[in-house]
Image: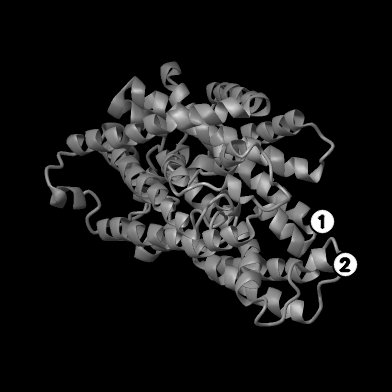
Amino acid sequence: MSQFNIDEEIEEIAGGEFEREPVPQSKLKSWKSFLGMYAGEHAAGTEFVIGPLFLTTGVSAFDLIIGLLLGNLLAVLSWRFLTAEIAVKYRLTLYYQLEKIVGKKLVIGYNLANGILFCFLAGAMITVSATAVGIPFNMEMPKLTDTMPNGITWIIIVLAIGAVISIIAAKGYETVSKAANWMAPVIVLAFLASGIVALRDLNVHNFSDFWNIWGEGSEPFPGQIKYTFWHVTIWSWFANAAMHVGMSDLSVFRFAKKASSGWTTAAGMYVGHYMAWIAAALLYAVYLKSPEAQTALSAGTAPTVAPGPLAYNALGIFGAIAVVLAGWTTANPTIYRAGLAFQAIVPKTSTFWVTIIAGSVATLAGLFPAFAMKLLDFVALYGFILAPMGAIIVFEHFFGKKVNLVENYAETINIKFNRAVFWAWIISFGLCYFVSITFDVFLSFMTLPAWLLCGILFLMMSKKNISVE
């Protein structure tokens, strides 16, 4: 899930160039350059939370195991046949390609939304790391239903972690990205080991025992909704909606020699979003058998979902360290990306201070456990907001010539705000969100309709020459 630093790492390989021009042939990379990158980047801090949260929704074995299998396949297909296909044709970053169509002013609005959502995600990862750092201090862990800080110890630890992460992101991203590459195998190993240990503790001896951990499912925990096969499938498909159908990973695959490099995303989906999620869920299944969890369930409250203690109980200090690293290696580049998004709005501000500001916002968000405890909902909202903008690029690429659309309208006509794009985005987002809220429709179910509607409205409005400042 957390591949938000992939494009920076590729930029580093290329010397940080080509932000506003196509990547030259001499800088193209083979599929091997993407395989390890995606495998490592999708086994990170978010996985320690998402796996357990699936159990809280009362999902069945079939719905979880097969639903994740299909949903992740759909994500891979989206990367391969949409993102990678367009990326190797134009070889531009998302932001520059979008700017050509929508104009500089509208891209600023998109960057603001991107930056804020990045900060909230980074805040959730600071929360994840805090649950591990708080173990030796006997800190009270946040409950599944907690929204506010639960004590002074929690506040101090979160502020300390946030300060360290923010300063490192602002001063030494190159070192951080290299360290993250070294840490990724350790984190993947921790997930694998956690799953194996959990299977032992759950007395799993064969596949039937494994299947029966979830069985036919159960009632969701207090405050959670019941997940079915389609909830799991659609949610896992769009967990990275901003990156594939939202076209953010154009910045990654513009360096690919061939569009077939898009298949390498399978390494990330099935190592991180399959093995790691299930392994983390197994850790939580072990915890649910503990007297503490049983007492909470008996009282009608949701047991704690705290990655730190879960990993520590399985792997000891190695597990706790893995959680700290996983949260840190996700939060740090995410804050860095948020800083870049904000800097695009105020370009004269120094990178250092704008990243510090982004880190401060993320740290404040980390004080509130709701961002981590409701990560399934937040990730759905994140993709829902940003994905439709990717439809603008996709629909222009595949249907623009068929409807005689002016290619790169904002650049060609020399405007800074393409109203056709703005209204297509707002109407699709607003209408589908209204349907979700009014009729209590699972938000991820509305991501594809919003994406399609945005693309169709863009074509229709562009044909009517609404694209004027």
- The amino acid type of the residue labelled 2 equals Glu
Residue 430: x percent and y percent? 67, 67
Residue 226: x percent and y percent? 38, 59
In the picture as drawn, the residue positioned furthest to the front comes out as 26
Left or right: 29 as drawn, with respect to 40: right
| Residue lying at 86% horizontally and 71% vertically, measured from the top left | 468
Q: 107 or 358, which is in the foreground?
A: 107
Which of the 4 quarters of the picture holds residue 218? bottom left
- The amino acid type of the residue labelled 1 equals Lys
Q: 16 or 432, which is in the foreground?
A: 16
Q: Secondary structure at mark 1?
A: helix
The mark that comes first in sequence, 1 or 2, is: 1
Q: Provide the residue designation for mark 2.
A: 469
Name the image quarter holding the C terminus: bottom right
What colour-coding does the image apply?
A: one colour
In the picture as drawn, the residue positioned furthest to the left comes out as 205
| Residue lying at 29% horizontally and 56% vertically, measured from the top left | 65
Instruction: Count residues near mark 1 (Cα–Cα under 10 Å), then give few for <14, some for 14-19, many for 20+.
Output: some
Left or right: 395 as drawn, with respect to 264: right
User: On residue 105, which mark appears?
Assistant: 1
| Residue lying at 15% horizontally and 39% vertically, measured from the top left | 203
Residue 64: x percent and y percent? 32, 56
Instruction: Count residues near mark 2 (Cα–Cα under 10 Å), then give few for <14, some for 14-19, many for 20+.
Output: few
Which of the 4 quarters of the picture holds residue 92? bottom right
Determine if residue 298 is in view: no
Is 176 placed above or below 107 here?
Answer: above
User: On residue 346, which mark appears?
Assistant: none
Instruction: Kindly report the distance in space between the C-alpha atoms of the residues bearing marks 1 and 2.
Output: 10 Å
